[in-house]
Image: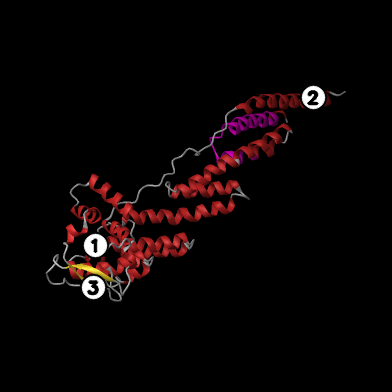
Amino acid sequence: MTSARLFRGVRLAAAQALVVAMLAGCAELSELPVTDGDAGADTTGAEPDFSHARVMELLHEGRVDQATTMLRTRLDAVPGDNSARQLLAQIESPPAELLGAASFEYEVQPGESLSVLAQRFLGNYRLFFALARYNEITNPSMLRAGRTIKIPSDYWDGPEPSREPLDREIRAREHLANGQPREAMRLYEDVDPDALGQDELALLGTAHRRWIARALNDGDYGDARARLARTRRQAPEDGSWEDWLTGMDKRAVAEPAYRAGLAQRKRDPVAAARSFKRALNADPGHARARNALSALRIDTVPELHRRAVILYRNQQLEEAIELWEQALSIDPDYQPAQGYLARADELRRRLETLE
């Protein structure tokens, strides 16, 4: 036997021994614990910010418990908010004490709402819910023409205020309550937002926010971005819309990335993980993307690791390394794959040295 052939035989034997030794060492790693990534992450959504307009909308829809909770929370935080205190009084005080016992009957006409009637007969449209309770109406939005209601006769004896801004606000609120944000926005097309009062400005902001959210929810992301751009051009100069506009900007990036991840997770879990991470980079509070990534880590990573171990033990080193790299691209903290991949990389390096 020549010295060259003898050397090749010794090198092959050494390589085989090295593989066996490395496989034996990796068997110890299979006992490492499996981590679940973000499985324990908190996904509780934050409560919406308080606004008087939102409370009035809830009352208009008859959602009294939710409105009461918001008002009490507000008054705990800001005891001096008299508008919130007056709204809570409409919910909790006997209506006859608020409006007086004496009354006359009135037949509701087409186009009239409790807000319109409260403004006309009580001098303040915000008293619509007290007027609803005065008539045992649980859902003010369901008032229909032709119904006969009681109107307090001693509460208001002043002249009817100017109606133009009031009618606009009332109609806008009713459009929002009926799920028509675009119609509410049209009422303000010729109005400078900076000339509006606080309540109407918040109302207009709510209409824009729901208009944008509708496009996002429908998956029409190009239209959503166009609506965002339009809203930014029409936003008030005081910056009061900036926080929720920034949130919508994040959603406009995160939502399509999240939906792409949903479409990819069966055929290409690595691409799905990238999409979910892109959604979370845009909007760290995107709970659905966080939950989807966590589920992908729990369901997919251990399976990739299991298949890689089988390949590795069959001495298919490159294929095993590729699967571990995929697993760790989805969950960089998955310890079993970390350990095996480190051993596999070391084995590959030593084999290359022997060649």
Q: CA distance from mark 1 to mark 3?
A: 13 Å
- Element on which disc 1 rests: helix
Residue 345 belongs to magenta span = yes
Q: CA distance from mark 1 to mark 2?
A: 103 Å
- The residue indicated by pointer 3 is 106
Where in the figure is residue 93, as x and y percent of width and height? Answer: 21, 54
Q: Residues within 10 Å of mark 2 (few under 14, many from 20)?
A: few
Q: Which mark is residue 134?
A: 1
What range is drawn magenta here? 323-352
Residue 137 belongs to magenta span = no
The amino acid type, in three-letter code, at marker 3 is Tyr
Q: Residues within 10 Å of mark 1 (few under 14, many from 20)?
A: many
Residue drawn at x 20%, y 52% as measured from the top left: 85
Residue 239, by quadrant, is bottom left
Q: Nearer the viewer, mark 1 or mark 2?
A: 1
Residue drawn at x 68%, y 26% as measured from the top left: 22
Where in the figure is residue 279, as x and y percent of width and height? Answer: 48, 50
